[in-house]
Image (tube, rainbow, N blue to C red):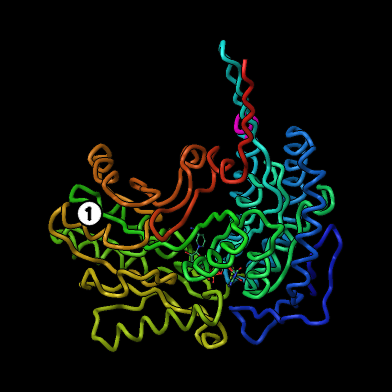
Amino acid sequence: MKVNMLIESQEVATTDYDGIQNPGKLNQLVGYVAKGTANHVDLAVKAAHRAFLKWREISLEERISLLLTSTEKIEEKMEEIATITAEENGMLLNRTKDEIHLGLADVRLLADLANSAFEVDYHEDDTGWVRVEKKPMGVVGCIVPWNAPLILTMQKITPIILAGNTVVVKPSPTASMGVTLLLKTMATVFPAGVINVVLGDGEVGSALTSHPHVRKISFTGGGPTATMIMKSASETLKGIHFELGGNDPAIVLEDADLHEVAPKIVEAAFRRSGQFCFAIKRVYVPRAMYEQFYELVCNLTDNYQIGYQLDEKTTMGPVNNEQQYRKITELIESLESSGANLVKLGKKLEPENWENGYYIQPVVVRDIAPDAEVVTCEQFGPVLPLVPYETEAEVIQMANATEFGLGSSVWSSNSKHAAEVASKIEAGMTFINGHGQTPLGSKYMPFGGIKQSGIGREKTIRVFDEFIEYHGINCHG
Ligand code: NAD
């Protein structure tokens, strides 16, 4: 299978293609992806700019209607998009399907909110009147990572397009086949040039972040890349919108029912092999409950069946790419060589194929210092440190001792008390007795982080503000 770029509704082939390795079967290629250049970015941005001049004139009603039609097209292609994404990404097939379902729900929710988001603000008195219109910005460059590629792409482009902007999307090289198919499916219902896709890595990304016709960059990925983007975007004074990494703490309070909370904490730490931005990356447990919690966590973690992502028995797939694999295995090796107290758990489904994929057993680390690297870094893999604490003041201080500030959670049988602890945590999001948004949370809780975990928010009615310009018109008398 060969995947080409999409510029102004045309498939754009190149002379060079990258072979895409299956992270669960390293001796197999999933397909070939076109290698884009800065020239392709220029063509795509110019096409998006031409399309913008017409798209901004289309009514909001029509934009909403086209977006909703595109969700039906995605549903028709669900099986194909989910399967390719699982093959190239390493994510379990039921997860990639979940991503599409959740992404579609987000798209529909945003379509529902759009009318109130774009209401014109009008006021008058005896000195005159003022009207504040909400206008689109132009071309927005969207850069997405590999770890939750489908939902992040849908979530990202929806408010941008609804606001009357057009997009050039650059997926990650290790998850571009599924995203490109998703975007091409959506693009069929929109006028040519509203949705464009360029393919490649940093070189193509930086051509997008420095292009003078791009008004804003919406980026989801790691902090070091965000720093480069900020520098590059500064040359043409573009707006930026960043969703970055995290180091989410889970704080178990003294009155928590451990049998109830342990399975949820384990799931939120090891889902997708720990490769999601708001995965639980460190757990704080009262010292008096530590042994019991440790036993429960180990027993639950040992149930994971690690194997090929499309095998129905598998509950933990491989990690996404070689760099990820090295980073996580080096972290585990350095813990082992420093004498840390850790256990490798789970069952290898096909031990004979273990070396033929980026497979890693989930690891639980105990009795580790609060400032150890494994506690303070974004592991982005199946490694979970459990840290004991004595007092609530101490645990709040430990939870906040980081430059990250994405998600966090508090676990307790007293939600009022948990909420008091929650509001002392420095994070964009804190969950109580869960780690992720409920349907109500999805509707009303902006998604994103503070400190070095992000700039701006996604989801809810607030996200529209990221992609509009205010135009005030004030009449005297
Ligand atoms: P990454 O920063 O390595 O890459 C992200 C994207 O940036 C890719 O498409 C990549 O090709 C592109 N890129 C690389 N160099 C670039 C450059 N110089 N200019 C422009 N673009 C460039 O991140 P990753 O490894 O793909 O993703 C993992 C990271 O993403 C983790 O830190 C994770 O926490 C974060 N993330 C955050 C959220 C969130 O919502 N906060 C969600 C998912 C992932």
Coordinates of residue 160 in the picture (x, y in percent)? 66, 47
- Location of residue 62 by image quarter: top right
Coordinates of residue 123 in the picture (x, y in percent)? 58, 19
Q: Which residues are magenta?
A: 114-118
Residue under the point 65% across and 72% down: 87
Quadrant in which the C terminus appears: top right
Q: Is residue 311 above or below residue 78?
A: below
Residue 244 appears left or right of 40:
left
Work out whether residue 264 can be spotted: yes
Find disc 1 in the rendering and name its residue: 396
The picture quadrant for ligand 1 comes to bottom right
Coordinates of residue 400 in the picture (x, y in percent)? 27, 57
Q: Residues within 10 Å of mark 1 (few under 14, many from 20)?
A: some
Q: Is residue 438 above or below residue 184?
A: above
Residue under the point 71% across and 47% down: 165
- Location of residue 231 by image quarter: bottom right
Quadrant in which the N terminus appears: bottom right
What is the chief secondary structure element of the magenta stretch? helix
Type of residue at label 1? Ile
Work out whether residue 76 can be spotted: no
Coordinates of residue 68 in the picture (x, y in percent)? 73, 41
Residue under the point 65% across and 75% down: 203
